[in-house]
Amino acid sequence: MRADPKLLIYCALVLLPLTTSAAAAGDVPPVAAFAGLPQVQQIALSPDGRSLAYIQNVEGASYLVTQLPGASGPKTILKADNQKYRFYHFQWVNDRRLLASVLYPDYRGGSETNETRMLAIDSDGSHLQGNLLQSAYRFSDYKHVPQYQHGVLGRSPDGPDSLLVALDIERATLPDVYSLDVRTTKLRRVAGNFGDIHSWQADRQGQVRVASGWRGKAMKVLVRAPGQTQWLPLSTYTVDDYEQVRQNAIEPIGFADDPRYLYAYADHQGRSAIFRIDTADPALARTLVYADPKFDIHGSLIYSKWLKQYVGVHYAGEYGTQVFWNEQARSLQDQLDRALPGKTSRIVSSSDDGMRLLVSASQINQPSSIYWLDRQTGSMSKLLDTRPALAGTTMPAPRAIKFRSRDGTELNGYFTPPWNANAGRAPLVVLPHGGLVSRDVASFDAYTQFLASRGWGVLQVNFRGSAGYGAEFEQAGFKRWGLEMQDDITDGVQWTIAQGLADASRICIVGASYGGCAALMGVVKTPELYRCAISLNGVTDLRDMLAAEQRFINYEIAAERVIGEWWKDRERLRQTSPVKRGAEIRTPLLLIHGKQDRSVPVEQSRDMAEALKDAGHRHYTYLELPLADHVLSREQDRIATFTAMEDFLKRYLDAIPQNEPR
């Protein structure tokens, strides 16, 4: 694709405040290259494709920035300090108006919460409406102040400044649907909650068409045909009954431009697949669109604005998979692949007519870069690198691995060799992922590459209970924390040693959230295997964690289903809680926890540190970060955490004196 001079000027203007120097060839990048926030974390074109908006991270703060036609340079229109507030999301409402949501920690009734609020602003920084819902109603008029106020369903037919939003103003946790004018702040209810409905979906014409909810563990999804008022049952099942989940669970994704057709996930031969449902058919007939015999298709459905239909899907698979069932979309993707060879290219934003595109290009061992493509002129140029300090750095790629656990279960995962590694066995960091249900994927990961850059191999195991391998495999991990899930990690370590990839005398285990629990249980159950362990925002007391989770409305279908029942399973929960096994731990430990963590309370690590102290453990360190949240949103907290991990792991994984504790 040929370069266009005007386009290159546009690109330079975007890059001007963003460019930073990369590490010199052969250098090991500093901690901040990995722990720092990405230079840009969201970027989008206006509907007409003439304006650009993005969230830029600079020195720990985040800015919403726009680039407008004829402007002399980028313009900052909003700032978040990432201490009290951080940006959650933004979107173009029309060619001039932007909607942004912010996330912040708060308290309700003595309980710690996360809250979101919405703001609207013109792209030139004028006509700011801060806290849209407060503007729409005086607080004295509320029956309930919604905790989460970012639930945008799509465009409203009320006008170009209007969106559909789900808000629980009348009854807490049971939202109705409103049309909100983001310029005048006018609010009009368009759909009322008729009982136990917790989420809604609208079609592309702005009609509310799907209602989903639950009571206890009983789930339901309702749908109505185009132009009809009657709600029809689409899916009903009990979440802890595997056969019901397999046969009946349907998860709506979104509507095609033709309001008759709803796309959804449902089971196909033991894996989640994509179906198209005819909502005008009284039988709600569904047609299989795409399935993978090995992996769940839980990813991002690709919607083409200019073709006005879903054209493909991107999902994790083994190395990241992108599939197109539309020939025009596939042809465009082929052009991108030829223009950016060796990269995985994805369209992340486009004008409504499809003539101007933003394309993300990455590799499984490289952070992404953003390109601008003008299809009318055929010109393409790079806008920015999301992590410029790592641009051009050669990093090892994660390698997919497969092995069988002690009970014969097939397990998958990834091994990333250390940077500049010589052949032979290397020190190993075992990095179990978090939960409640998730998985490791083959893509650039700052934690993994940071550890590998310091000379350590990294093992990531998708133990039973991980997502992506079918409902049966996922549910095999329910209520098995510290048991078979832990054994799967151990078996993965033994496999890595047997393959000659790891030095059996230099292995540490590091994890965050559930991964922190797994790290601690690793040194409880197999202390001979690990020289050290790190728990970051880790769960240590399962019963206390369940007690804390009971404040959430989805407790029965989430924490209780995955971890266990507080009273009925009390003995198993005690045996698999690291805090109750502190006297058995002699391995050196580093505990790190953010005081502002709203997902895993900081008391989980405080209690663990106290248990270690009471047991006379002499080789542990507890680091509490006063302003850190669960995901370390603040750059300062990430850098502090990575630095502490590096110092700790160097002591136990590199040259080890004979008198170091084991």
Image (spheres, rainbow, N blue to C red):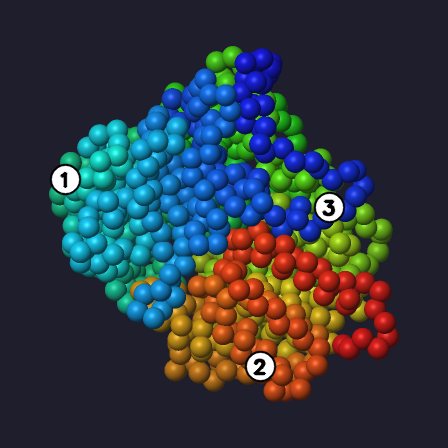
Place residue 424 in its image quadrant. bottom right
Q: Where is residue 621 shown, x and y percent of the image?
A: 66, 73
- Residue at 56%, 70% (x, y): give it: 517
Q: Are marks 1 and 3 in contact (CB under 8 Å)?
A: no
User: Which sits earlier in the primary sequence, circle 1 or circle 3?
Assistant: 3
Mark 2 crowd level (few <14, some 14–19, many ≥20, 10 Å Cα): some
Place residue 475 in its image quadrant. bottom left
Q: Are marks 3 and 2 in contact (CB under 8 Å)?
A: no
Identify the amino acid type marked 1.
Answer: Gln
- Residue at 25%, 47% (x, y): give it: 133
Identify the amino acid type marked 3.
Answer: Pro
Image depth: mark 2 or mark 1 in front: 2
Q: Which residue is mark 1?
A: 228
User: Which sits earlier in the primary sequence, circle 3 or circle 2?
Assistant: 3
Label ID, residue 135: none
Q: CA distance from mark 3 to mark 2?
A: 36 Å
